Amino acid sequence: MKVEALDFGSSQGIVIPMEVLDRMGVKLGDQLELSEQAGLWFLKPIRLDATAEDDMERQLQAATLCMEKYKVAFRKLAD
């Protein structure tokens, strides 16, 4: 599967197709670990023991990402 490096403001990144994220079990706000071994790169979800505190942190991260992404729409709705 090919992906392309893209500009995201002052950063660069890649977009991982939703079908891949679904197969990995990755949800919005999840953290991933990127590692290298013998010239090969690996990306895997960081699995935390599910405590109420971890779950709340994950939900807050997802909400923050959503608010940032749709901040213009939220401002218009608030007016």
Image (cartoon, rainbow, N blue to C red):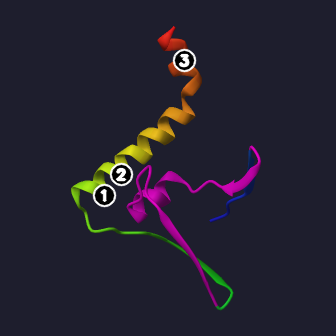
Q: Residue at x 48, y 12 (%)?
A: 78
Residue at mark 3 to residue at mark 2: CA–CA distance: 24 Å
Q: Residue furthest bottom?
A: 38
Percent coordinates x, y for residue 42 in the rendering: 56, 77
Percent coordinates x, y for residue 5 in the rendering: 74, 58
Residue designated by label 3? 75
The quadrant in which residue 14 appears is bottom right
* Label 3 neighbour load within 10 Å: few <14, some 14-19, many 20+: few
Q: Residue at x 67, y 60 (%)?
A: 3
Q: In what quadrant of the picture does the N terminus appear? A: bottom right
Q: Is there CB contact under 8 Å for labels 1 and 2?
A: yes
Q: Which residue is nearer to you in this view: 28 or 4?
A: 28
Q: Residue furthest top?
A: 79
Secondary structure, mark 3, is helix
- Closer to the N terminus: mark 1 or mark 3? 1
**Amino acid found under the numbered disc labelled 3:** Arg
* Label 1 neighbour load within 10 Å: few <14, some 14-19, many 20+: few
Residue designated by label 2? 57
Secondary structure, mark 1, is helix
**Amino acid found under the numbered disc labelled 2:** Glu
Percent coordinates x, y for residue 60 in the rendering: 39, 44
Residue designated by label 1? 54
| Residues rendered magenta in the picture | 9-37
Residue at mark 1 to residue at mark 2: CA–CA distance: 5 Å
**Does residue 18 sit above or below 3 in this rendering?**
above
The quadrant in which residue 51 appears is bottom left
Asked whether residue 48 is drawn in magenta, I would say: no
